[in-house]
Image: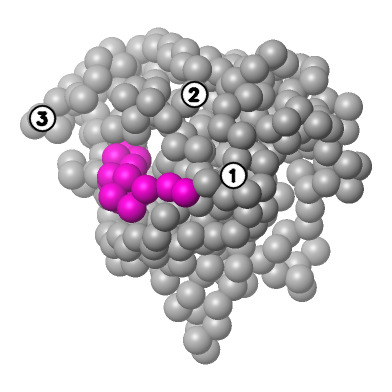
Amino acid sequence: MTAAKQTTLRERVVLSGAGVHSNSPVRLVLHPSEANSGVTFLRTGLPGGRERLIQANWSNVSMTELCTVLGTQDDASVSTVEHLLATFSGLGIDNVTVEIDGPEVPIMDGSAGAFVEAIDSVGLVSLSAPRRFIKILKPVRIEHGRGFSELRPADRGFRLEVEIDFNSGAIGRQKKVVDLDAQVFRKDLARARTFGFLSDVERLWKAGFALGASLENTVALDGERVLNPEGLRFNDEFVRHKTLDAVGDLALAGAPLIGTYRSYCGGHKMNVKVLEALFADRTAFQILDSHRREASRAEAAFGNMAPAFSPEVN
């Protein structure tokens, strides 16, 4: 167990930018939030002046191709949430309301660095409620092709063991193992940028993706070459970014995990699928608070709560 109490922001903070896929300008306002409210997106700017609340929960994920999307396009959605959610998880922020006036979280420089800096500028405060944890009780595994993602029990903390294997000399096979806390997140993961291959650009454009990608927010690869003039921030920046993505996607569990996450050739889809598998088996996890008391049966059900963004959606 780490911090005993839940946290939120000391005061609100504002960021702006454009989405890497939509290229749409967007303004984010991160608001302090009450204990036990979790992470919630307030999607504004909808037709007719409508607004919609979308809880950051695995049950609200509607798409995982190239990014993680919460909500639905025909009602309200927010895409590319993973870097922001990773920041909240990595820094130990339990409760925050993300007011966003566009369809996609801004990509900033392709990493979580700008989000960390913004949050550090206002700081955090502790709340009176004890922090809740999800303790993994038995292995849960998802396989797809040659890849897999799994959650395994651990006595304490949250470890990630992420391995990637690309048929590219610039990347190759890389593995990163981290025991997640705020210091590790800032030092080892936050500044690792998203990446993509020049050979995929035309296909992605036709599919409506990567419309806002540039050398300012993406590590671009052409064959064996890194095209960014400044080069890489880390020798293994690629697997560090995949680990950052995994932290963000797994934050959709709704509370910090106690266990070990392992993946090989995984991604957004498999990150979310392993959460689906976990919460489908009530014997695979236990809800604890920071005083190690087992939560009630009713509280344990929060992992399977119905989508909060639209009561009309089945």
Q: Nearer the viewer, mark 1 or mark 3?
A: 1
Pointer 1 residue: 6
Lower position in the chain sequence, tag 3 or tag 2: 2
- State yes or no: residue 114 in magenta: yes
The correct choice, above or below, for 209 with respect to 13 in the image is above
Amino acid on which the number 1 mark rests in the picture: Gln
Q: Residues within 10 Å of mark 1 (few under 14, many from 20)?
A: many
Amino acid on which the number 3 mark rests in the picture: Glu
- In the structure shown, which secondary structural element does the residue marked by tag 1 occupy? strand
Q: Identify the residue at image location x=23%, y=34%.
A: 220
The location of residue 187, given as percent across then percent down, is 31, 24
Image quadrant containing the C terminus: bottom right
* Magenta span: 111-125
Which residue is more in the foreground, 224 or 186?
A: 186
Amino acid on which the number 2 mark rests in the picture: Leu
Question: Which numbered tag is attached to residue 180?
Answer: 2
The location of residue 104, given as percent across then percent down, is 42, 59
Does residue 192 appear left or right of residue 176 in this picture?
left
- In the structure shown, which secondary structural element does the residue marked by tag 3 occupy? loop
Using the numbered discs, state the Cα–Cα distance from disc 3 to disc 2 in whole angstroms.
28 Å
